[in-house]
Amino acid sequence: MTAGEDRPVLTAHVTVASDPIGAIDRRLFGGFVEHLGRHVYDGIYEPGHPSADADGFRQDVIQLVKELGVTTIRYPGGNFVSGFRWEDSVGPRAERPRRLDLAWHSTETNEVGLHEFAGWLEKVGSELMLAVNLGTRGVTEALDLLEYTNIPGGTTTSELRRANGRDEPFDVRMWCLGNEMDGPWQLGHRSAEDYGKIAGMTAKAMRQLDPDLELVVCGSSARDMPTFGAWERTVLAHTYDDVDYISCHAYYSEREGDRASFLASGVDMDLFIEEVVAAADEVGAARGSDKRIRISFDEWNIWYIDRYHDEDKATGIGNWPIAPRILEDRYSVLDAVVFGSLMISLIKHADRVTSASLAQLVNVIAPIMTEPGGPAWRQTTFFPFATTSRLARGEAVRLELDVPGYETARYGTVPLVDAVATRDAEAGASAVFLVNRSQTDAVELRVDAATLGASRVVSAVTLTDDDLDAANTLEQPDRIGLAPNASAALADGTLTIVLPPVSWTAVELA
Ligand code: AHR
C-alpha cells in the first residue's frame, strides 16, 4: 500500500531502452472519412447548421478535428470505395448523379465530392490519402483519377479538373489500392492471387504516371481472417517491388463480458503487426530484396460490430436512405482505455508502422459526434488520440516493464501495464504513455527517466472513472475527460506515478 491510497498498489520498475525504436512518422496519427451513414452528410457537412461556413461545413466540427490532431485522412472509403465512380463526385453539383451505395444500402448524392472534401481538408489542416476502386473497377479508372488529381494540365482529364475550379493539382501522395479485398462482404472480393495481379498492374501503371507515389496494397481485414498470412505472402509476391505499404485493419470490442481479454487488445495488435512484418520480410528475403515494406494500419478502432448487425438497417429494393444513423457507437471509459493502449501498440512499432488511420472521424464509430442543428461533442476516445498526437514527437523509445501478469481467456498471461515513451531531442521534450489493465489494482511505476533526458514533469493526465461504462452523450457531453494525475513526480532521475485500475495516462516531460 502507498500512503494516502485506500486501494492496494502494486509497484513496478520500468527501464528505458537506450536504442530508439525509430522515428515517429506524423502519419501515424491519421484518420479516415468514409461516405457512410452520417459521417459526411449531417456530420462534417450540414449547410443549414448555425455554425456552417459558406461551403456548408460545420465550423464546430472543424475546430474539434483540429483539436484532435489528425494528420492524414483516408478517403472516400472503406467498403464504399469498392462501388464508387469518382467521376460522379466532380463537376457541377446540380449535374452529379445520385447512386446506390451497395456497401451501406444508402443513396449517395455526391453533393460532397473530391473538390469539396479537399477544401475541407485545407480547413482542418490534414493531408489527403485516396483509395481507388479495385472492386468494380480497375487500372484505367485508377489512372484517370490519378491524372485528374496529379497532372498539372494539358490533357483532357487534368483540364477537366481545372475547368471544375481547381487550377493546381491536388498532388495526392498516398494511395490505397482498393479496400479489404480479402473480405467476402467486399464488392469485387477476390482471391489473393487475383487481387495481387490487379493490384500489381495498377501499381505499376500508377507509377508510370507519377513515380513518387506511396502505394498501399490491401493486407488482411482482420487478424482472424481465414486467409491471414497466406494473403499477405501471395499479394506481396505480386506487388513487392511496386508498393511501399501493406495495410492492416483491426477493430476490437468487449465480447461476451470478457473484459480481461478486451483490456489486452493491444497484445493482439502487437502480434498482428509483428506477423505482417514477418510475412513481408519473408517475401523480401525470398526475392533477395533489401527493400522493407512498411505497414499502413489504415483502419483501427473499437467497434461493436455486433451492434451494427443488430441495428434497424435499411433493406429492400425500394429503401435506400440518405445518411442513415448507422455505426454510431457510443464509447465508454473502458473503450477509451483500450483505445489508448492501441495507440501505445502503434508507437511501439513505429519502425515499421509509419501510417495509421483511426476509423473513423465523425458520427461513424467516431471520436466526434454531432446532432443535426445541435452541438458537436468529444467521445471518450477523443482524449487519448488528441493527447498522443500532440505529445508523441520525435522518436519512439521502448520501455522494459517489470510488472506482474494477469490471465486472459484469449491471450494467456498478459502484463498488467503496457507503456511506451517518445523523445524529441530537438525540442527537449519527451513523453510516456501508459495503460493499467488491472481491474482491481493500482500500479505505482518507477521509470528511469534520465535516459529520456527528462528532469521535469510538465503535465500528467489520466483517463479513468469509477463507472467504466460512463460516456459523453448529447445530454452529458462533458461527463468524461482527462484529469490531472497528481501522483506524478520526478526526482533524482526517477519518474514515479500511480496508475489507477483500468486507466490510460500520458506524462509530458521536459
Ligand atoms: O470502418 C467501417 C468499415 O470497416 C469500412 O468501410 C471497411 O473497410 C471495414 O470493414
Image (tube, rainbow, N blue to C red):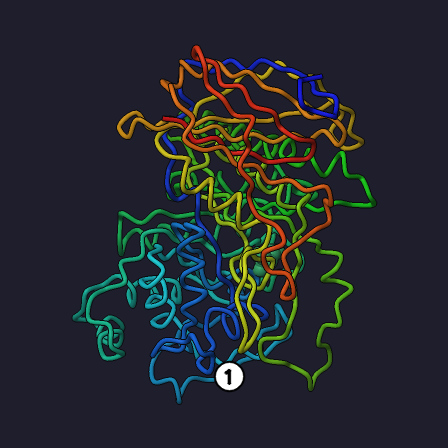
**Residue 177, percent across and down?**
45, 54
**Residue 241, percent across and down?**
38, 39
Of the 4 image quadrants, the one containing the N terminus is top right
Relative to 266, 295 lies left or right: left
Please tell me in which quadrant of the rendered image residue 483 appears.
top right
- Total labels: the figure holds 1
Relative to 268, 122 lies left or right: left
The residue lying toward the viewer, choosing from 360 and 160, is: 360
Figure check: 258 above or below 270 = below
Can the viewer see residue 39?
A: yes
Figure check: 328 above or below 400 = below
Please tell me in which quadrant of the rendered image residue 62 appears.
bottom left
Q: Secondary structure at mark 1?
A: loop
* Residue lying farthest to the front in this orientation: 4
* Residue lying farthest to the top in this orientation: 492
Q: Quadrant of ligand 1?
A: bottom right
Of the 4 image quadrants, the one containing the C terminus is top left
Figure check: 162 above or below 130 = below
Task: Name the amino acid type tagged 1.
Answer: Arg
Determine if the C-beta at disc 1 is less than 8 A from ligand 1.
no
The residue lying toward the viewer, choosing from 139 and 124, is: 124
Relative to 90, 6 lies left or right: right
Can the viewer see residue 189?
A: no
Please tell me in which quadrant of the rendered image residue 340 appears.
top right
Q: Residue at x 47, y 79 (%)?
A: 49
**Residue 363, percent across and down?**
57, 64
The residue lying toward the viewer, choosing from 237 and 413, is: 413
